[in-house]
Image (cartoon, rainbow, N blue to C red):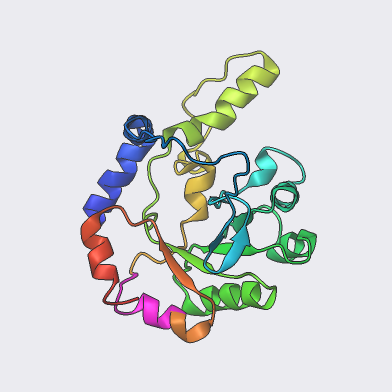
Amino acid sequence: MSKSDAIRSQNVSSSIAANAENIRAFARFFFNARIMRPVSEVDLSTTILGHKTSLPIFVSASGLAKLGHPLGEVNIVRGCASSNIIQMVSSNASCSYEEIAKEAKPGQNLFFQLYKNSDNAVAAKRVQEVERLGYKAIFLTVDAVVSSNRTRDVKAPWELEDKESGRLRYYVEGRESVEDTVIAGTSGNLVAMDDQNMTWETTIPWLRSITKLPIVVKGIQCVEVRILQKYFM
């Protein structure tokens, strides 16, 4: 994917078109029910990357959980513990990786979602920290190398202020400089330092060289990439 393709893909997402298409795509999936099977006792437990879970799902990474609750990711850890399912922790968690790990119950499994920093030393330090803390796998995010035009994210602080103050906020020339306007939004700025030059040939061998944890490539969007992946994983 070229940089222009990446930007185009991200801009489609920012227009909420991708969200609508995802909803339509999932609406086309149906369960083909079986009959005459014993169902008085049903066991949905399984393993993911060799780790037990009560359901064939896990809580995927989502950053800045404190925007929703003061306890942030700590609350998610507690919920996963009570349900015996696995949690993937975001690179952009609002709690420290250590704080999240300490909240986990004995035997509770955590995965880590890695936004790779463009500085290999910084990225390696992060990976080695979560490995030391007992995280069980690294999910390398590869589909967010370019920050999108996050229109809703940029508008959100304005809309929230309107609701809280009861007054309409609007732009007046000269009152606010261009530098004061955060075009990328909160989430967009979180990936500003991420590596835009990741490749199968360099990034995967590098990641393998610094950790013994299982590596999952997160963000594959087409079959062709999945076929290519088998040659490097």
**If the image is split into quadrants, where does the C terminus sit?**
bottom left
Q: Which residue does the image show at 55% across and 62% down from the upper left?
A: 47
Of all residues, the one furthest to the bottom in this rendering is: 209
Above or below, 60 relative to 172: below
Above or below, 96 relative to 199: above
Nearest the eye: 107 or 124: 107
Tell me, yes or no, whether the highlighted magenta stretch contains residue 206.
yes
- For the image, the number of numbered tags is 0
Q: Position of residue 231 (x, y in %)?
A: 26, 76
Please say whether residue 105 is visible from this viewpoint.
yes
Q: Quadrant of residue 9?
A: top left
Tell me, yes or no, whether the highlighted magenta stretch contains residue 204.
yes
Q: Position of residue 143 (x, y in %)?
A: 37, 55
Nearest the eye: 158 or 66: 66
Give, as a single range, the part of the protein colored magenta: 198-207
Q: Position of residue 28 (x, y in %)?
A: 31, 31
